[in-house]
Amino acid sequence: MTIRVLVAEDQAAVRAALVMILRAEPDLEVVGQAADGEEAVRLALELRPDVVLMDVQMPRLDGVSATRQVVAAGAAQVLVLTTFDLDEYVYGALRAGAAGFLLKDLEADALVDGIRTVARGDGMLAPSVTRRLIGTFARPERQVGPEVREAVAGLTPREREVLACIGAGLSNGEIAGRLEMAEATTKTHVSRILAKLRLRSRVQAAILAQDLGLMI
Amino acid sequence: MTIRVLVAEDQAAVRAALVMILRAEPDLEVVGQAADGEEAVRLALELRPDVVLMDVQMPRLDGVSATRQVVAAGAAQVLVLTTFDLDEYVYGALRAGAAGFLLKDLEADALVDGIRTVARGDGMLAPSVTRRLIGTFARPERQVGPEVREAVAGLTPREREVLACIGAGLSNGEIAGRLEMAEATTKTHVSRILAKLRLRSRVQAAILAQDLGLMI
DNA sequence: GCGCCGCTACATCGAAAGATGCAGGGCGGG
DNA sequence: CCCGCCCTGCATCTTTCGATGTAGCGGCGC
């Protein structure tokens, strides 16, 4: 079964080169070409390719926005291709739902390999991008220890609700209003929460709630 | 210039196979072999290879912990290799500072390619891992709006320091101590920050600092 | 039934927090 | 040189927090 590819690239010469590379592969079929983002989205919805090879810089609609639309429609896997290794492009494309991000300085082999990888649902990144992504992922050592997790588990349901409100940045009065209790009661709960979690202020409780993904 | 590799793998047969694959490459040199994690760390510190090929499951010291020690010592780039594609292994290894994570079902080509990639300081992940990493990265759409970003940009350097301290959960007194200013001054800064960012309490400022990745 | 626990409520009090006004010193641009 | 901005400091005052004690009420297990 061949992999159906849509090539979206505004520079005709580059586009022709890409198409030529892909046509040389027996398992790849170029089903369409787009010269701008709008055309890319339109053709992706119409042709339903397996993979869209998407340039970032394109007229009328940039590649990142086009990627977002194609992915939102579930039309295809998107492999983003660009000349510039900018964080802005990388993160934008990945947040937009791209399955891969390659730089144009790559070999033909790596490109077709990337297309095959993306087509079967996996991800493919340029090596330099991979390293940065690992870096940004590894940094958040904001993992909370198990002893904190059990302390939170030791809270009563009501106290957890209050903690969530603290994590949302509410004052005692606002919490009282939202949970329909007197402000004095809220204070009681807050005090208990701080004591149980060994914290000294609601600010620390709010940060903890953030780290634990509590809040509303 | 050849790439010096240390192979850490407890199963002798697998280790032998890996070494054989690497020896077939003219630009790779296997400078050492380890059968457990402790030996891997010891040899990495002693031999200072370019790359450590590290198995996850090993006796005496697991691969993730060994990776952490090797990376902490700055002894080598670590490429983790495992049979099982478990989130726990992947995230553990990457947080420990691994430059790459491959699965043992790969081709010999992909392995040597990965070693070369890691050796030059880039990252290399198995395709399925790449996709999951992209997924976990893209999800946090806790992106704050641009208007908030410029509001933060409008803070003075000193105010940003204070904001970072607030994000760390410090009280005004503690901030004053850390930044060597009077508590009254701290309060002044806090008030300015809240006014500029249109917030009503330091708790909200702390949450914002968290989202922006400020803090210490 | 009785005790324990969780939720609620209120009062009180000291400690933070936050707003506001005033002021001096350093520093760059007009 | 002077003006404006930033950082710093201090004082004052109100509000909010947080701790602590007391207490009523409903559910649950023994």
Image (cartoon, coloured by chain):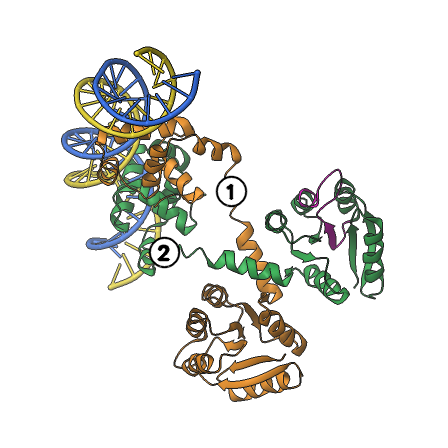
Chain colours: A orange, B green, C yellow, D blue
**Measured from the top left, where is residue A164 in percent x and y?**
35, 40
B165 vs B107, nearest the viewer = B107
Disc 1 crowd, CA 10 A, few/some/many (<14, 14-19, 20+): few
A200 over A133 or under it: above or below: above
Q: Nearer the viewer, residue A155 or B45?
A: A155
Provide the residue designation for mark 1.
Answer: A143
Q: Which residues are magenta?
A: B48-66
Residue B153 in view in this figure? yes
Between the C-alphas of marks 2 and 1, the distance is: 22 Å
Magenta span contains residue A176? no
Helix, strand or loop under label 1 = loop
Closest to the observer, A135 or A185? A185
Marks 2 & 1, CB-CB < 8 Å contact: no
Chain designation of label 1: A
Amino acid of disc 2? Val
Kindly identify the residue that appears in the image at 47 percent across and 59 percent down: B138
Q: Amino acid at mark 1?
A: Gln
Percent of width and height locating residue B14: 81, 53
Quarter of the rendering occupied by the N terminus of chain A: bottom right
Q: Circle 2 — which element?
A: loop
Q: Which residue is mark 2?
A: B144
Give the camera-side residue of A187 and A2. A2
**Can residue B60 be found in the magenta stretch?**
yes
Seen in the picture, residue D9 relative to B199 is either above or below; the reply is above
Relative to B64, B205 lies left or right? left
- Which image quadrant is residue B109 in? bottom right
x, y percent for residue B204: 31, 44
